[in-house]
Image: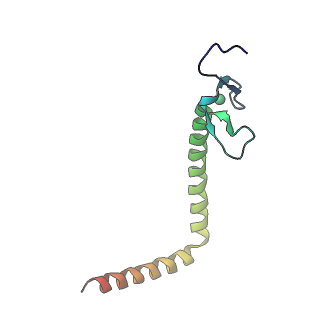
Amino acid sequence: MENTTNKTNILKNCKKCGKTKDIELFRNQSNSKDLKFPWCRSCQDKESKNNYLQNKARRLELVKNWQQKNQDKIKIYKKNWMLRKKEIIQKSDK
Ligand SMILES: [Zn+2]
């Protein structure tokens, strides 16, 4: 067996960008076959950023819809919350 480098560079093909990169550029993932995430770090970062932005927009939309449908509930909830807040303030304000 020939050992030309001290550090063995294991390469892995990124499933996202298709580039072959050093295994060190992949994050660990305990439940995957080779314990590495199938995407390289930069792809993962890009994707999580995209997902975050998409989810954020989607969540805002969902909240908006929910609020429109549940205006009465929200009113009651806010009222209850204000009452509780008052109570807390009164208790702590001796
Ligand atoms: Zn990649």
- The quarter of the picture where the C terminus appears is bottom left
Q: Quadrant of ligand 1?
A: top right
Is residue 65 depicted above or below 18 in this figure? Answer: below
- The quarter of the picture where the N terminus appears is top right
Q: Position of residue 25 (x, y in %)?
A: 60, 30
* Residue found at the very far front of the displayed protein: 1
The number of callouts visible is 0
Is residue 24 depicted above or below 78 in this figure? Answer: above
Is residue 14 depicted above or below 58 in this figure? Answer: above
Q: Position of residue 2 (x, y in %)?
A: 70, 13
* Residue found at the very far left of the displayed protein: 94
Q: Position of residue 31 (x, y in %)?
A: 71, 47
Is residue 4 depicted above or below 36 in this figure? Answer: above
Residue 71 location, quadrant: bottom right
Colouring method of the image: rainbow
Taking the spot 63% from the left edge, 40% from the top edge, the residue there is 28
Residue 8 location, quadrant: top right
- For this rendering, which residue is in front, 23 or 93? 23
Taking the image as shown, residue 90 lies to the left or right of residue 13, namely left
Residue 48 location, quadrant: top right
Taking the spot 61% from the left edge, 16% from the top edge, the residue there is 5
Taking the image as shown, residue 2 lies to the left or right of residue 57, namely right
* Residue found at the very far right of the displayed protein: 33
Q: Position of residue 62 (x, y in %)?
A: 61, 60
- For this rendering, which residue is in front, 17 or 67? 17
- For this rendering, which residue is in front, 64 or 29? 29
